[in-house]
Structure formats: structure tokens, C-alpha cells
Image (cartoon, grey):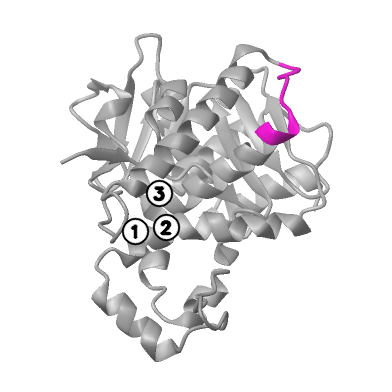
Amino acid sequence: MANHHYLPQFYLRGFTNKEGKFLIYSVAKGRFKGENKWFSPASHFFIPDDNIAPTEGWADNYLETICSANESRYARILDKIKAVDQGFGLINEDIVWLNYFAGELFWRVPSQRELIDSAISLDQLNQLGVAVIDRRTMQQIDPKQHEEWVKDDPFYFKRLRNVLPATNYWNMLDCKWPCSVKTFTRPFPAICSDNPVMLRHLEKADAFLDDLIFPLAPNKMFFRIRNMREVFNPNLKFYIDMLMLLQAKEYVCCVDPHYLERLYTVYKQNFDTVDELRQMVFGHFTGS
């Protein structure tokens, strides 16, 4: 049995302390695991055999092979970004892969499993931007035939997680606004949740066309926001961390338990819902 990380270890290592470890907060239990024990990135944010999907003509772990190949590219790009505070030396291809990384993680994490597992009918797939075509006729397959295939394939939903970003990435052809990586000069303690990709309109579930914020390191963020301001308050990083914490499903890693507690306290004092917080965060970057 293999532990397949939905958040890659190279990504998680960017949110550890100097010893390469972090604390783990359990969202369900409302407390830190192991009485504030320090854990390595290998210890969490995985599901056993999550990328095993036997398919005729393919290796059983072909999904993990695809993920691993992409992760090698992502890791090299993040190394560039973490090496300096400005002038990251990114080329167009790097930006393409950063966008894909964000979209891929959006669909890999447990928070999206309920949505994916409900996509049984062709209509539901179409709403997620996926069409199922018969190779012989080049027409959409019969809906009843598709439902039978889904019932007969115990690994259908695992494969769908891989198909969704590959299909929805083409939505970016309609994205006419720039992406950017920003460094926050004021230091904030490292924190990351099991649902790190933040969308402005979560109900649309479109990680390639919606406004997006994606943490790359404790002080660096990837932004793709329409009409984004050039200058903004650096203290917004606090509220970005708050949003990432509040949209977590199971676990949050951090290096300072008091920072996490402070995020919860300020949220309860100032917001009634996570959606209200979400709109405030994105609204500050656009002025609307």
C-alpha cells in the first residue's frame, strides 16, 4: 500500500520550520494532534493508494506516474520563486504550469471529492466542463450507456479527478488578464491547509477562469485576479491565511499555534460566514 499525497511533499516542505517539520491541526477535533507534536510532510495530506486505478493496457499506478511527472516541473518552478523576493526569472511556460498546478490541486484535494463523486450523469459532467465522446462517431455517447459504464467502473471517480484539470484548462483561452507572483515583505508564520487554492466564486468550481489565490510559500502568493490593483495592503496576507484556514476540510499545518488561534479569533469577531470573508479578500484586490 502506497501513501499518495494529494498535497505534494515538495509543496508542503515550503511551510515547515527550520527542522523541516510542522504542527498539525485537526479541523474536526478542534485541536492540534499529538499534544503539539511536530510532524514531517510525509506524515499527512495523503490517502493510501489514492492514485491506483487498474485499466486495461495501462499500469495500475498510471495516475500516480502522471502526477509525479507534473510535480517535478512544479518543484523546479517553486525553487525559482523561493530563491529570491522579486524578479523570479519566470518564463511563459512557467506561468502555464503554475496555472495548471493550481487547477490540478483544486481537484485533487478531499474538499472536492463530494462534487466529483456526484458527477454520474452526462449533464453533471457537462456542467463541470467534460464531454464524453464516442471515438467511432465523434458524438456524445448515449446517457444510459454512460451511466452503465460508471456503475461497472469502480475507479471512475479517480480517473475523473485527473480528467477535470486537463479538460478545464482550455477555459484559460478566455482568460485575458495577467497572472502574477507577489512577495509579502511583512513576515507571517507559515501556514497551509488541505484546501489551499482559493477561488472567488467557489460555486462555479472553475479553477482556470475564476479569480484565484494560491499560496506558494509563507510569503509568496500566485494571483490570477481580473482588474487586480497594483498596490494593496500587505496585511491582506493575514486574511488570505484566514480564508485558507476556514475552507480546510480535515487538516491544517502551521509552525505557530498562536497564529492559528488568532486567525480563528479575528474571524469570529468580524465575519458571520466564510463567504463574507471570501468576498472581502477578493474585493480588496479589485476595489469591488
The image quarter in which residue 101 lies: top right
Asked whether the residues under the numbered discs 1 and 2 touch, taking CB atoms below 8 Å apart as contact, a structural biologist would say yes
Residue bearing the label numbered 3:
109
Is residue 249 shown above or below 36? below
Asked whether the residues under the numbered discs 2 and 3 touch, taking CB atoms below 8 Å apart as contact, a structural biologist would say no
Please tell me which residue is depicted at 49% across the width and 21% down the height of the picture: 189
Residue bearing the label numbered 1:
158
Residue 64, position in %: x, y? 34, 43
Badge number at residue 96: none
Residue 2, position in %: x, y? 20, 39
Badge 3 amino acid: Val
Badge number at residue 161: 2
- Separation (CA) of disc 2 from disc 3: 10 Å
The image quarter in which residue 111 lies: bottom left
- Provide the secondary structure element on which disc 3 rests: loop
- What segment is highlighted magenta in the picture? 86-94
For the N terminus, the image quarter is top left
Residue 222 shown left or right of residue 255 in the figure: right
Q: Nearer the viewer, mark 2 or mark 3?
A: 2
- Provide the secondary structure element on which disc 1 rests: helix
Q: Which numbered disc flags the more N-terminal residue, 2 or 3? A: 3
Note whether residue 273 is visible: no
Closer to the camera, 246 or 80?
80
Q: Nearer the viewer, mark 3 or mark 1?
A: 1
Badge 1 amino acid: Lys
